Image (cartoon, rainbow, N blue to C red):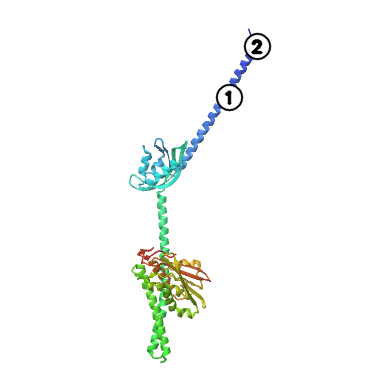
Amino acid sequence: MTPSVSELQLQIQQLQAELQRRRSAEEQRADLQQTLGAHLQRAEAALRESEGRLRFTLEAAQIGDWVLDFATGQTRRSLLHDRCFGYDRLQEQWSYEIFLSHVHPDDRPAVVRRIEAGRAALRGWSGEYRVVWADGSIHWVRTHVTVQHADGKATHMLGIISDITQQKHDETARLKAQQLEAENRQILEASRIKSQFLANMSHELRTPLNAVIGFADLLQSGTVDADPAKRRMFLSHIGNSGRHLLRLINDLLDLSKVESGRFEFYPEPVNLASLTQDVIDTLSPASQAKQIVVRTEIDPSLHDLVLDPARLKQVLYNYLSNAIKFTAERGRVTVRARAEGARRFRLEVEDTGIGIAPDDLPRLFSEFQQLDGGVGKRHQGTGLGLALTRRLVEAQGGQVGVRSVPGVGSVFHLVLPRAATALPPSTGEFGVPTLGGSAP
């Protein structure tokens, strides 16, 4: 059937509308492409600007950058990267293997481990290591690395690198200066302490010497009455002063021997209760003069001790004499001993004395130091007793220590093997021979 005129007109109108719609779509597509093109151009310009700023920043900071392609093993990098390895121009060839050949042999295994770990775990890392230049000089570099990956597999490793050799040299110089300054302070402090010790020692020596000479002159002059009791008293003063001098000289000699490693010990079976009582009896005049009660608490299981009895008496004498010296009248001093495991024992001397301030505790057991070391000190002494005690105990494989509460009292202790053996000397901080470890 032939379409009517109206039908043909309708079809023509529909075709014209479709054509118009298609023209509009084409125009919109063209506009969109133009807009996208403009956006792309602006994005590319912004990217170039950003890359330029980044490049300027890296060059200003003397930081090189690089990208390692795991698939090819090739590395793209900047000139500043190659300068970190001693080159003034960008090298034509560079790879992972060439990089590793420049890493210092001692640092190479650690660098390889970090790279492999970062690749396996898909995470970055940072580190410092040494590289060897073509002229043989060694330089330090610092690197920061990140890993790119796809589908759980590392594809690229990106990083930045900088030469920190000068920083390392500056840090070494700074640490050396700090070390020298600290050593200088220690030397000055040691000089001050030894000067104070010499002043104390001269006083400690002059006092008994004056007594010996004074009483001896009185007896020799004939001006003293013929009263036997008075003469015995003078002779007793001479004897006590002489023994005091002998103890001072023996302490100095013993400390010198221990420090030089020439001190000898003679272990033998020891009855600890009897030895303790001997020391208490020796110091009984001093304790009785102040009406101080001295008690003992000795573990009866400590019957298998093999020690040098003379040296054990010496250290216990130092502890006990200090306890009596610094305890007020009618105070208490307790000597106790107990097992410290199967092979050691612990000996303590506790007093109800003046106590020790926490800040002063580190100074105890140090040579030539007294907590009350000024000209107007209230208690006599040279500062050798506790230092010698520490040396003697450590030389037999033991340790010393103290705990104290100011105004309440102190507890000095030592821990020794039940069967002591002398340890070989070791060199101290300034090349002075020492024995054993440091005081706790």
Residue carrying label 2: 7
Nearer the observer, 242 or 372: 242
Residue type, mark 2 in image? Glu
In percent of width and height, residue 87 lies at: 36, 42
Q: Residue furthest right?
A: 6
Residue type, mark 1 in image? Gln
Q: Residue furthest bottom?
A: 226
**Upstream in the sequence, badge 2 or badge 1?**
2
Q: Is residue 320 above or below residue 51?
A: below
CA distance separating discs 2 and 1: 32 Å
In percent of width and height, residue 76 lies at: 41, 37
Q: Quadrant of residue 236?
A: bottom left
In percent of width and height, residue 283 lies at: 44, 78
Asked if the residue at tag 1 contacts the one at tag 2, i.e. Cβ–Cβ closer than 8 Å, the answer is no
Residue, x 52% and y 31% (percent of image)?
40
Residue, x 36% and y 68% (percent of image)?
259
Neighbours of disc 1 within 10 Å: few (<14), some (14-19), many (20+) = few
Nearer the observer, 248 or 223: 248
Q: Is residue 63 visible?
A: no
Q: Secondary structure at mark 1?
A: helix
Residue 306's tag is: none
Does residue 4 appear left or right of residue 227 in this picture? right
Residue carrying label 1: 28
| Eye-nearest disc, 2 or 1 | 2
Neighbours of disc 2 within 10 Å: few (<14), some (14-19), many (20+) = few
Residue, x 56% and y 27% (percent of image)?
32
Quadrant into which the C terminus falls: bottom left
Q: Quadrant of residue 6?
A: top right
Q: How many numbered dots are placed on residues in this image? A: 2
In percent of width and height, residue 427 lies at: 36, 63
Quadrant into which the N terminus falls: top right
